[in-house]
Image: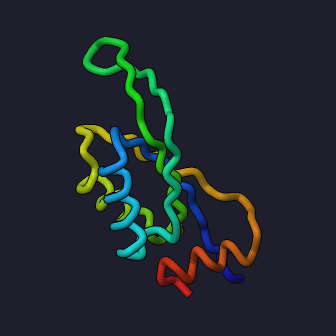
Amino acid sequence: MTKKKEYLLVLTTCPGSISAKKIAQDLVTEKLAACVNIVPGVQSFFSWVGKVDKANELLLVIKTTGNKYELLEKRLKKLHPYELPEIIAVTILTGSGEYLKWISTNTGES
């Protein structure tokens, strides 16, 4: 029986467009992600150092495969300006077969 390939959406936020674009460019260039969407206008409220803080951020939506996740997380931590970046992976349960194959191809997995 063939194991079904795992596809992921990885979410992170950035403080500005320079860091967001650098992360997106590097992850795609290094084939750790097939695509990164940068979504502007995110308002975040969070607990940090014992108080509620807030920030205007950009959301990065990263498309990758389960096989690339560990390398992607390691690289993202190195590139990210935050001391503790948000890095959350969500499994893609289903999607267009052609698009999922495109993710595989563009992460060097096919």
Q: Which residue is the extreme one toward the top? A: 51
Residue drawn 60% across and 65% down? 7
Quadrant for the N terminus, please: bottom right
Q: Quadrant of residue 92?
A: bottom right
Q: Quadrant of residue 55?
A: top left
Between 32 and 5, the residue placed more toward the observer is: 32
Is residue 2 placed above or below 12 in the rendered structure?
below
Q: Which residue is the extreme one toward the bottom? A: 110
- 47 lies left or right of 83: right
Place of residue 56 in the rendered image (x, y in percent of width and height, measured from the top left): 41, 30
Is residue 26 placed above or below 88 in the rendered structure?
below
- 105 lies left or right of 77: right
Between 5 and 51, the residue placed more toward the observer is: 51
User: Looking at the image, how many numbered discs can be counted on the residues?
Assistant: 0
Place of residue 107 in the rendered image (x, y in percent of width and height, measured from the top left): 48, 77
Is residue 104 placed above or below 87 in the rendered structure?
below
Place of residue 36 in the rendered image (x, y in percent of width and height, measured from the top left): 49, 60
- 83 lies left or right of 29: left
Between 1 and 65, the residue placed more toward the observer is: 65
Place of residue 72 in the rendered image (x, y in percent of width and height, measured from the top left): 38, 63
Residue drawn 35% across and 75% down? 30
Quadrant for the C terminus, please: bottom right
